[in-house]
């Protein structure tokens, strides 16, 4: 398994997509820094601060929340492009067969590929999130209530997406798989938006739909939990102001979230492994 | 000779299409068997079943007594696919090193060096796959298949991209492998190659084994040619045993004889007849 994982890791780091994502990340962080600087420059000029509301906290949580969305999106691009052709695509190109005729279980190949993709993408989102957090602090003196938890939750979200994309690569062609995973990603985000709308309107139905979808697609629940965690200790009118903002619908992590996310990855892996075992190459 | 590769009544269907209709085949230790057949005959399917890459609809295959596809079978197996590709960023040495780890080989650098020498790539150890010609990659593929010293080698069109010198290198390598007791199943369209190196030939057409035997057994007598002062005279379909009588009769008739040849049909003729395209 280690041989497969190390090989896949080296391959991941060599892929052109990694350079493209690296450049996009630098561009994103540059623009994010500029935006944060402008935002806090304006916040500092508020003539009549609202009593009881810490404007820096509201602004910091809002812009860092946006950065977390961008980070998750870039991490998802990386996860999808590293795994979308891992099985069917590689088999069609003749890359997989020489490996599979070795005394290596097909399941081991999947686990190795997953370990490599999840490590690369997880490390990537952690680094980008921490960089965005540091930039926010540099321009505002504001630091989120939690740092490690949200970073790990974002890493967990891309690990879930890597697992889905890898499983899709067993059944679908690379193009179809990429489209399918991005549609799932979009569905999760839409569910999150529905949850926010439900929260604003007081609609229990929308809330429930959002809840169910976020559990069916736990990357969304992990993302929501990460968003909630950055202002977990914020209370009073500031909390109220954050709740009115675009990330007011963020949900705190249930104690079952991590066990479920890990079980979900294992379940997806088991389905992928069963399908792979039956696949003619 | 004990069979290292054994295929019994292999059947494979892809929907309504029957790629294999009950093919049985055995390859013994140190035996080189050529697998011939037209495109779509089922040759690659047979080889892939033996490798465990394709699941048979019926029948079974074993490698060294272990079911095809099992880790035990894979430990005894080396395989070069017809359509293969290696990561272009790996060097030849790195690629073989990775396959050593996957195969559990402890041959180390010496094994890698020997294998590359055997396929004529001794100078290309640090060269990246992406910079190699198709022929070099095919040789590297053969070296990769031999990692770990397999008991059975399944080679699917291993010389299709090689020039004549490369083919000769591979031919000599196959002969050396036979001497070492390695069983080789060679899937090829190059009848002359098969005729030169293989101990036995199996011909598949439309998913069925239509002929099998040594190249000599498959080719048939096809007449006698006699060189006379008046030119070459052909006695079509005359068996070898008729040669003395024919010569006696020609001499008695006043002909001067300069040469006598007993003709046999080529493997190509046998092949075309077996697949129904003669």
Image: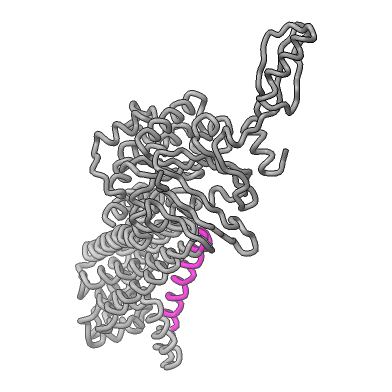
- Name the residue located 35 percent from the left edge and 35 percent from the top edge: B180
Above-or-below relation of B254 to A204: above
Q: Nearer the viewer, residue A273 or A139?
A: A273
- Name the residue located 52 percent from the left edge and 41 percent from the top edge: B187
Residue A29, x across and y down, in percent: 32, 58
Residue B203 in sight here: yes
Q: Which residues are magenta?
A: A172-194
Residue B269, x across and y down, in percent: 67, 34
Task: Assign the C terminus of chain B to one quadrant of the image.
Answer: top right
Q: Nearer the viewer, residue B218 or A95?
A: B218
Q: Quadrant of residue A139?
A: bottom left
Q: Quadrant of residue A236?
A: bottom left
Q: Nearer the viewer, residue A229 or B141?
A: B141
Above-or-below relation of A241 to A69: below
Report if residue A267 lies within the magenta region.
no
In the rendered structure, the answer to whether residue A215 lies left or right of residue A60 reads right
Residue A128 in sight here: no
Task: Assign the N terminus of chain B to one quadrant of the image.
Answer: top left
Residue B118, x across and y down, in percent: 36, 30
- Name the residue located 46 percent from the left edge and 72 percent from the top edge: A184
Q: Nearer the viewer, residue A146 or B162?
A: B162
Report if residue A177 lies within the magenta region.
yes
Provide the major secondary structure of the magenta segment. helix
Residue A56, x across and y down, in percent: 25, 74
Above-or-below relation of B229 to A272: above
In the rendered structure, the answer to whether residue A5 lies left or right of residue B228 reads left
- Name the residue located 47 percent from the left edge and 26 percent from the top edge: B168
């Amino acid at each position: 398994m280690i041989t497969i994982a190390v090989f896949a890791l080296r391959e991941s780091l060599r892929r052109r997509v990694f350079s493209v994502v690296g450049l996009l990340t630098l561009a994103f962080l540059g623009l994010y820094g500029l935006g944060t600087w402008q935002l806090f420059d304006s916040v500092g000029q508020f003539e009549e601060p609202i009593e009881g509301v810490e404007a820096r906290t509201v602004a910091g949580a809002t812009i860092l929340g946006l950065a977390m969305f961008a980070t998750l999106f870039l991490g998802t691009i990386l996860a999808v492009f590293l795994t979308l052709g891992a099985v069917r695509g590689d088999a069609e190109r003749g890359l997989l067969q020489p490996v599979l005729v070795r005394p290596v279980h097909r399941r081991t190949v999947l686990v190795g590929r997953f370990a490599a993709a999840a490590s690369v993408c997880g490390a990537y989102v952690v680094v980008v999130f921490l960089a965005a957090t540091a930039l926010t602090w540099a321009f505002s003196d504001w630091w989120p209530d939690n740092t490690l938890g949200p970073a790990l939750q974002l890493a967990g979200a891309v690990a879930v997406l890597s697992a889905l994309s890898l499983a899709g690569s067993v059944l679908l062609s690379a193009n179809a798989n990429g489209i399918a995973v991005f549609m799932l990603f979009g569905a999760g985000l839409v569910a999150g938006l529905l949850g926010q709308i439900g929260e604003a309107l007081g609609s229990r139905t929308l809330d429930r739909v959002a809840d169910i979808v976020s559990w069916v697609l736990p990357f969304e629940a992990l993302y929501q939990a990460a968003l909630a965690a950055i202002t977990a200790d914020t209370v009073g009118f500031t909390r109220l102001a954050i709740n009115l903002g675009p990330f007011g619908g963020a949900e705190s992590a249930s104690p079952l979230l991590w066990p479920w996310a890990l079980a979900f990855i294992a379940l997806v892996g088991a389905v992928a492994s069963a399908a792979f075992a039956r696949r003619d190459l | 000779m004990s069979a290292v590769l054994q295929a019994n009544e292999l059947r494979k269907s892809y929907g309504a299409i029957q790629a294999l209709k009950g093919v049985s085949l055995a390859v013994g230790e140190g035996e080189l068997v050529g697998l011939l057949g037209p495109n779509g005959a089922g040759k690659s399917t047979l080889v892939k079943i033996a490798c465990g890459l394709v699941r048979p609809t019926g029948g079974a295959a074993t490698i060294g007594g272990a079911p095809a596809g099992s880790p035990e079978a894979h430990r005894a197996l080396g395989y070069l696919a017809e359509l293969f590709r290696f990561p272009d960023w790996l060097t030849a040495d790195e690629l073989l090193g990775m396959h050593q780890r996957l195969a559990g080989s402890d041959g180390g650098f010496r094994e890698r060096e020997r294998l590359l020498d055997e396929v004529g790539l001794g100078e290309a150890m640090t060269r990246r796959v992406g910079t190699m010609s198709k022929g070099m990659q095919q040789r590297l593929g053969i070296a990769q298949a031999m990692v770990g010293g397999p008991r059975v080698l399944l080679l699917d069109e291993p010389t299709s991209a090689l020039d004549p010198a490369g083919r000769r290198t591979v031919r000599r390598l196959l002969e050396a492998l036979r001497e070492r007791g390695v069983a080789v199943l060679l899937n090829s369209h190059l009848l002359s190659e098969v005729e030169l190196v293989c101990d036995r030939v199996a011909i598949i057409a439309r998913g069925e084994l239509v002929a099998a035997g040594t190249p000599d057994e498959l080719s048939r007598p096809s007449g006698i040619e006699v060189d006379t002062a008046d030119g070459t005279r052909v006695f079509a379909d005359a068996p070898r045993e008729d040669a003395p009588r024919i010569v006696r009769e020609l001499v008695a008739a006043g002909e001067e004889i300069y040469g006598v040849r007993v003709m046999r049909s080529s493997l190509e003729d046998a092949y075309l007849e077996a697949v129904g395209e003669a």
